[in-house]
Amino acid sequence: MADLEEPELLHLGLEALHEEMGGKMVPFAGYRMPVQYPDGVLKEHLHTRAAAGLFDVSHMGQVILRPKGTMDDLKLAFEALMPVDVLGLGEGRQRYGLFTNDSGGILDDLMFTNRGDHLYVVVNAACKAADIAHMTAGMPGVSVEPVTDRALLALQGPGAEAALEAMVPGAAAMRFMDHRIFGDIWVSRSGYTGEDGFEVSVPEAQADGFARKLLAQPGVAPIGLGARDSLRLEAGLCLYGHDIDTTTSPVEANLTWAIQKARKAGGAREGGFPGAARILKELAEGPERLRVGLRPEGRAPMREGVELFAQDGTPVGEVTSGGFGPSVNAPIAMGYVANAHAKVGTQLMGEVRGKRLPVTVTEMPFQPTTYKR
Amino acid sequence: MKYTKEHEWLRVEGDLVVVGITEHAATQLGDVVFVELPETDTMVAEGDEVCVIESVKAASDILAPIDGEIVAVNSKLVDNPGLVNEDPTGAAWFFKLKVDDLSVLDQFMDEDEYQDLIG
């Protein structure tokens, strides 16, 4: 089957480099991507937290939004798609955003950056085409320009700053969620691991050479999608299509922090985004269910789909992401539970292979973040 | 050593059959993070799910390759699941079976046949 599917997969610019490094290539969001290298997921994960990991995330969608009128028109048009303050984001700064639908569900989550005379947006690979169509249809006064000639690399971990500074002098001076343009290289100080680090957009023609030079820096190792997933899970970050989707609202998803004051009730630009009725109501009254962190008591991981029960046997929810946290050195999970059972410290049961095992609602992240604020 | 299509190895030790998973299987599974072992002194039938292995990627079962009685389990694996990756064909045995007749092992592959299977 895999052989039959292979020709239909899209190929990314760094494929030769991944194969040279022994990357195990798998289909992911329509692309052929490295899930791991010979070190394996566990070592790659721990290496990222101890030194620096280089991830190829070129499958993600990079998009430029250019105003046909003023920059404020563009920001307000973008605000009409998200419960997020775009107008208040300063130049050279990045912010987390969410496209919502009319019923208050999440179409995708994304990062956007104010680059003075335009916005730069990074969206999930699997949602890329739909997002571009959504933005094009939803913002008639805006030029939506997919960036198709750039690779995207993430460099994450305590060694990331020194490694990138050696190649892009000035990068070390950036703070968390800063964005700077260094000639052809676009750098954001952000990521998906909970570690300090960067996401670097590089013209495709330079990407292979750039990645090789980064890998030659002390402590930098290539990291596959497997460890990317365990790192983001320990950081308590959502994976679209699993922890958030068109049925989960931002409030249920515990992403209320991403909705700034300006868009909430009583704010300067209250509402005015798809699904505002549900989202504002949930902000005021609390959601029916909430995404929470979960710590299984034993060693058995509770994976996506594990059903959760209250002590009295009442079904209360389901795990949406779960596995083993290599840095936590224990199984960890996140999932949705009925609001009455969402308080930190609540004891629940998760059903694994027919057995109900104890699990506790916990704070996230599971692993302290090390962002350079 | 004998091998099953399910990538288990079987080794005779006195009148017992020791069962583990092959290096190929351990590599395919990735880093093992959890092992659940059966109770000792239980009778199992060929094809019964007797152990659970969870790796960073997924959960899988170890099936009883033959009928028999589980007389010993390797509890070291519970505290140190990573042993399965470090020494799959040695220290990381899973359980020992007592069988009526060791000739049941004749049906399984030898080393060369197994190498052909995974080659």
Image: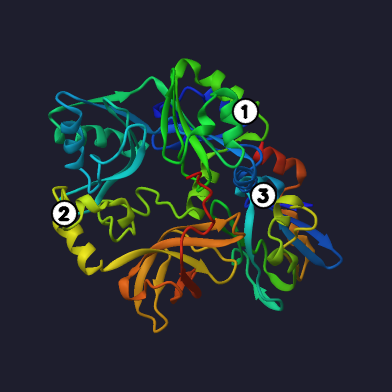
- The secondary structure type at the circle numbered 3 is helix
Residue picked out by circle 2: A276
Q: Is residue B24 above or below residue A69?
A: below
Report which quarter residue A213 is drawn in: top right
Task: Please tell me how crowded label 1 is: few (under 14), some (14-19), or many (20+) other residues with Cα within 10 Å.
Answer: some
- Report whether residue A56 is seen: no
Q: Residues within 10 Å of mark 2 (few under 14, many from 20)?
A: many
Q: Is residue A282 visible?
A: yes
Please name the residue that numbered disc 1 is placed on: A215
Instruction: Please tell me if label 3 and label 1 are on a single chain.
Output: no
Residue drawn at 63 percent across, 34 percent down: A220
Residue situated in front as seen by the camera: A10 or A269: A269
Towards the viewer: B4 or A89 = A89
Vertical relation: A4 (above or below) A98? above
Place of residue A238 in the rendered image (x, y in percent of width and height, measured from the top left): 40, 51
Q: Nearer the viewer, mark 2 or mark 3?
A: 2
Task: Say what secondary structure mark 2 lies in.
Answer: helix
Q: Are marks 2 and 3 on the same chain?
A: no
The reply, left or right, for residue B57 in relation to residue A59 is right
Task: Give the side of residue B95 with respect to residue A125, left or right.
Answer: right
Residue position for label 3: B26
Under mark 3, the amino acid is Ala
- Image x and y of residue A212, in percent: 60, 23
Q: How many marks?
A: 3
